[in-house]
Each structure stands twice: as C-alpha cells, then as structure tokens.
Amino acid sequence: MTRGSRLNWMGVFSSLSVLAAILLLVIELVLYSRSFSTLPAGLSLAEVPVGGLTEQQALEQLLLVYRSPIELRYRDQVIKLDPSLVNFQIDSGLMLPQVNQFRSNASFWAGFWDHLWLKPGQANDIPLRAEYSQERLRTFLNDVAARYDRPGSAPSADPDTLGFVPGEPGHALDVDEAVSLIDASLRSPTERAVALPISEQTIVRPSFDTLADLIVADVSLFQFDGIVSLFLSDLDSGRELTLQLDNQVPVQGPIAYSGMSTIKIPIMVSFFARHSGPLTAELELLLERSIDASQNAATDQLLSVLGDGDGFEGTRQVTADMQRLGLANTYISGLLDTLGAVLLPVPTPANSRSDLDTRPDPYNQTTVEDMGTLMVMIYQCSNGGGALMAAFPGQFTPQECRSMIDYLTANQVGPIFISGGSEPDGVVAHKHGWDALPLTNVADVALVFTPSGTYALTIFVHRRDTMTFEEANRFIISVSRAVYNYFSWSG
C-alpha cells in the first residue's frame, strides 16, 4: 500500500469517527431530552422512588404503595386494615406540582453532562400530603376491641374471710395509643404492620360495690335485725360509699341518730374555729378530757368557752357552725352533764322522716354522712385545704387540724369498734359513743391510716330491742375489718 492510500484511509476513518461521535452525541441529547417527559432521577414521592416514571406512572406507584393494607396484630390475631375504610386520601394535586421545581434547579448542559457520565440524579423527596378520618379509625378500633378484648373480672366478696376472691386477669386494647401507631403506619411506605398496644389487666381491684356486697353479707351472717348506717370515704381517691340497712334491707336517705359522745367532734371543731394562738394548759386539759377521757363535764366547759361563759350559747355556736359547713342534720341544743336544762330540739331532714326511727336524743343528733364528711374536712384541713378552711377563712391552720387528729388518735380504749377491725397496721383517730345501758345505739367515727391507704369510716348501729356491748363491739369490729381488708387487698 502506497503512502498516499494510507493517508486517504486515515482521513476517512477520522471522518467516520467524528461522524459517529456526533451521532452518539445527538442520540444522547435526544435520550436526555426525552427524559424531560419523565420525573427527574433520584426523585421520590413520599419516600416512593419515582425517578424516570411519567407523572401518571408515578401516581399509580404512589397509590399502589399507600393503598396497601395495614397489618394489625392483636396478640396472636392478624387483622387487615384497608386504608379506604378510614377514607385515607393522598392529595396528589398538592404533591405533583412540586416536581417542576426539581427540574428547573439545574441547567440543561449540567444535567446533560451528568447524564453522559451516568451520574445518579440528586435525591429529592416530596413529602406526603394525605388525610383520613380519625373518627372512622376509632370506630374500626372500637369494633376490634369489642371482638378481642377480654376484660378482667373483678374480685367477688368472700364473707367467710371478710375478704375477696380474686377475679380473672384480662386484656384490653389501648385505643388512643393504637390511633397514634396506625397514623404513623398509614403515612409510611414500608412500615405497614402495627403491633396493637394491649393493656394487660393482671390484677383487678375490688370495687366499692363489691365492698358493699361484702358488708351486706356480713350483716346477714350476724343476723343483725336493727338499723346499720355506714359512710366511707377513700381520702386518696375521693370515692365515697354510703350504705344503710334496715333489718338487712337497703334504705336510702339520711337517718337521724343520737350524737352521743361523737358530738364532741363538732364541739372540738367549733372550739378551734374560734381559738387562735397556742393553747393554754387548761384548754389542753379540757380537750384531752373531752376527747380522750370522754368527760361530759369537760365538754360542757368547752361549750361555755365557746359561748363566752354561756354553755347554751356555745351549743348554738356549734349548731350554727355545722349548718355553715352544710351538715344540716347535726346539732346540739343541751348540755351533756346538766339534766333538764335544754333548748328546743332542731328539726332536720333526717329527723323529719317518718319511716325510720332510731329514737334519737332530741337534743343531740347527727347522721353517719354528716360525721363522716366532717372527718374528711378535718383531714383535708390538716393538709392545707378543704371545706373547713373555705367556710372559715383564716380561722383554721393545718397545725390546728393536725392537733384535732392527734386528740382523736390519743383516744385509745383498747381494740374495740373500728380500732379493733383495723389491726395490725391501722392507726385510728376516732371518737366512739353509746347511749345509756341497756344499749340501743352505738357509734364510732374515725380516720384510719394504713400503709395501703387512708380513709374516713363512720358506723352507727341501732337496735329497737337492746343489745349487749359485746354484741355491738363484735359487729362493728367485723364490719370495719371488711373495710380494712378492702384497703389492704393486694390480690
């Protein structure tokens, strides 16, 4: 081959190479230009990759992912939630227009250069815009709960032990937490399974209704044929129970009882409402003799102090104070140690009823609700609040109310009544009372402090025929033991 022919061949080859390069460049330009009819590489909609797809294809892919069912697991049960059941809707009208901002961010030639070098597109994600009906989701979950929840059964009363037979454990769906978890799953392209939150009810406490059943059964076992009134307040939760039985049959409404020595609690409250500053030794002695020793003479002297030397004026003050506190069935209109000298009886809602009659003292009356409520007020006052401080602003301090509790706690006459039913861990601040022998009315009014809770408990009993002290004592101990066991119950 001659030198000239070789040069011609090289020229042809070079020309062909240039033409091939131009052709490839044109092809790549055409291919790159066509890519503008699809979504940019690296783009995702709500974390679903859609780069290289048309908008219609991208929308179809987006809906395919987000319309897939959510798998819900309730313990060993699998439940499918179709998003359409909760009206889950993607707002593509807000999402797709945002695609153009990613197309215009880079110049044509810079993008073409990246295309030639097979560089991946810049990762960009358009956030999900969607909504659904939370109300319909809750309806769905409530239906799931109705089918799969197994609420634990409450303990039942056990009169033989004055306690409770444990109930069965159960489980229940936590709907609020489930809504939050499913909300996140509906908005995720990958996390499409939810373990539903289940509350395991391993220990179900007895209710006040179950306690009432226990007390009614206990009264029946005693075959008590009189009137029994009980007021209970859980001082930690504020729950209250009032239970009244006439010959073992429940009755409603306040029942008037003789105040007996329990009236000394309202007298002590009225005394502290009007006294300020430290107590003198003489006043301390009067309070100790009135509450601890239960001396009527000392109590009459307190009434005299209240009335500025007039004991009857003192009784008026006590009655007015109880009215001010809303205790409309509690009053005293006579001195305790002075026979014959009395004021007029006071009509009340309790002593105005004609169906039940405990033959209460006309001049010294209360109800189980009034006395129990007053003990709650004293307790609340000792903690810096409650109705005593509200009704008598500036007239009570927490220390004064703690002093009242201390006087009642010092009233230790052996393990009788509520104290006898609150052993071994109960500390009892109480005032008990009974009428003259033979007994027809017996009462105990108490605050009980235990490691498991604090409560106010008031028990009044009346029998038309007489009862012995031992009968009344055993009966009240048994009822108070049922209450103590309720607060001490641990399953």
Image (cartoon, rainbow, N blue to C red):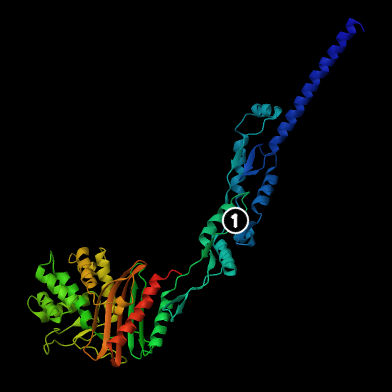
Residue nearest the observer in this picture, 179 or 48? 179
Instruction: Answer left or right for 197 relative to 485.
Output: right
Mark 1 crowdedness (10 Å alpha carbons): few <14, some 14-19, many ≥20: some
Residue 256 coordinates in the image, percent (x, y): 27, 86
In the picture shown, does residue 55 fall above or below 316? above
Residue 195 coordinates in the image, percent (x, y): 59, 57
List the single residue furthest toward the right. 1
Residue 349 visible within the image = no
The residue located at (37%, 67%) in the rendering is 452
In the picture shown, does residue 192 fall above or below 206? above
Residue 69 visible within the image = yes
The residue located at (35%, 69%) in the rendering is 238
| Disc 1: which residue | 194
* Callout 1 amino acid: Val
Residue 401, by quadrant, is: bottom left
Instruction: Answer left or right for 244 relative to 394.
Output: right
List the single residue furthest toward the left. 309
Number of dots carrying numbers: 1
The residue located at (23%, 80%) in the rendering is 262
* Badge 1 element: strand
The residue located at (51%, 66%) in the rendering is 201
List the single residue furthest toward the top. 3
